[in-house]
Image (cartoon, grey):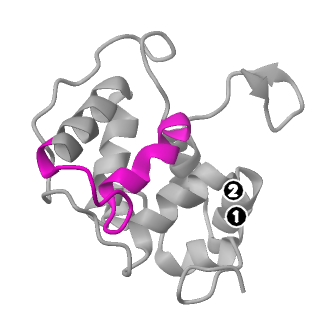
Amino acid sequence: MAFDETGKFGPTLTFHEILLKVNNAKDKPKKLQVLKHYDTSELRMVLKAGFDPNIEWLLPEGKPPFKENEAPEGTEHTYLKREARRLYHFIKGGNPNLSQNKREAMFVQILEGLTKEEADLLIAAKDKELNKKYKGLTANLVKEAFNWNDSFMKK
């Protein structure tokens, strides 16, 4: 629970819900506005990992075998916002001491804790396919929204 965009106390939007707002925004200025409004370091981590061509995921491409969490949203789930800090385990140079089996098992464990939508979002980020899942969400849009250069770093 946190304050929402109207200043009222209530549930925070999931990353999927935020990116759906980007998807549904009518034009680029509105898409930029959504990203800037919901800007957090965790959202930046996920988007950077999903768009930066210099970030190499150490996981097989595609949807891994995992049991989707079927609990009603907001009950038995964790959130990608909370799990974003663990993404370094799955990226080249992040945790070189982790065995590949352990890395893949940890990724599946995260997926199984997320809602179906956020698990799909994370898989799309891993496979660098966020732009296929969310219309208008591109590397250039993300760079412009967060004032990043072509290396996905602050200008």
Q: Is residue 18 left or right of residue 70?
A: right
Q: Which mark is residue 146?
A: none
- 56 or 48: nearer the eye? 56
**How many numbered discs sit on the rendered protein?**
2
Q: Is residue 75 left or right of residue 59?
A: right
- 30 or 154: nearer the eye? 154
Residue 136 on image: x %, y %:
48, 68
Could you classify mark 2 by the number of other residues whose Cα lies within 10 Å: few (under 14), some (14-19), or many (20 or more)? some
Name the residue rendered at 19%, 36% in the picture: 105
Q: Quadrant of the N terminus?
A: top right
Circle 2 or circle 1, nearest the eye? 2
Residue with the most extreme front position: 97
Q: Amino acid at mark 1?
A: Lys
According to the picture, the residue beneath numbered tag 2 turns out to be: 34
C-alpha gap between disc 2 and disc 1: 6 Å
State the image quarter where residue 33 is shown: bottom right
According to the picture, the residue beneath numbered tag 1 turns out to be: 30
Q: Which residues are magenta?
A: 80-101
Q: Is residue 44 left or right of residue 60?
A: right
Q: Is residue 155 magenta?
A: no
Residue 29 on image: x %, y %:
71, 71
- 29 or 73: nearer the eye? 73
Q: Is residue 94 magenta?
A: yes
Residue with the most extreme right position: 7
Q: Quadrant of the C terminus?
A: bottom right
Name the residue rendered at 35%, 52% in the picture: 89
Q: Is 63 situated above or below 80?
A: below
Q: Is 140 situated above or below 120?
A: below
Name the residue rendered at 49%, 45% in the picture: 84
